[in-house]
Image (cartoon, helix red, strand yellow):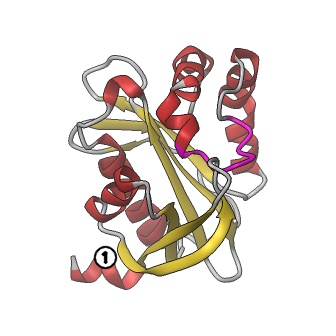
Amino acid sequence: MVHVAEVFPRTVLTTARLLLRPFAAADAPDVHLAWQDPAFIGSAPVGYPYAGADLPTAVSWCTGGMEQRRIDGKGVGFALQPRGGGRLAGHVQLFGADWVSRTAEIHYWTSPWSRGRGYAAEGAAEVARWALAECGLERIHLQADTRNTASRRVAEAAGFRFEGVLRSVVPARDGTRADMAVYSLIRADLDTD
């Protein structure tokens, strides 16, 4: 049954290998380390406030910031944790929720120590499926810098379909303008996959 609300429910999702759960204070040190990673900083949009952010910011983000976004109806974030235990593997977030058009954008990152295992794609696919099948959304989309091949591979592996390129849409960290590849997953795609 599809539930249409203006707030995502607080929930825990599971995949074959991952537990997708709300963030907790204990996640803050790993979040902070992930935010310091040169690859994370290099791929983050210009002005992204968490690229290189300090530990107190990570604590605040984990203990209240993500949950407040959910309560405000703006989105929902999940910590990716291997089901067998271990360190934080990454993050998947829906943001920019538009409850009138029933759309949201998806964002993900993988902790440096967890890269190359397919966790971001597995988590993004599950969050998108959940939002479309159980939360009443009709479309989940994302934008990735065309030069960020890792993010584009994640989108494709998660089942998102390439729609095209927005040219010169945002400033890049190297002083140029970045082209953004656009991907989406819509509810009808769930029936064909």
Query: In this orientation, does residue 158 appear?
Result: yes
The residue beneath circle 1 is 190
Relative to 147, 117 lies left or right: left
In depth, the one of 136 and 127 nearer the eye is 127
| Secondary structure state at the residue bearing disc 1 | helix
Residue 109 in percent (x, y) is at 47, 41
Question: What residue is rendered at 55% in x and 40% in y?
Answer: 42
Q: Residue 140 vs residue 25: left or right?
A: left
| Near-viewer residue (136 or 180) | 180
What residue type is disc 1 on? Leu
Quarter containing the C terminus:
bottom left
- Which residue is at a point 48% across and 47% down the rendered structure image? 108
Magenta: main secondary structure equals loop
Residue depicted at x 45% and y 71%: 132
Instruction: From the viewer's side, name the closer residue of 12 and 106.
Output: 106
Question: Residue 45: where, in percent of width, then height?
Answer: 64, 50
* Left or right of 165 in this view: 98: right
In the image, which residues are magenta? 43-50
Would you say residue 192 sits in the magenta stretch? Answer: no
Which residue, as the protein is rendered here, is positioned at the far front?
Answer: 175
Please tell me in which quadrant of the rendered image residue 66 appears. top right
Vertical placement of 89 versus 44: above or below? above
Residue at 37% in and 60% down: 152
Residue 138 at least partly seen: no
- Determine whether 51 is above or below 13 in the image: above
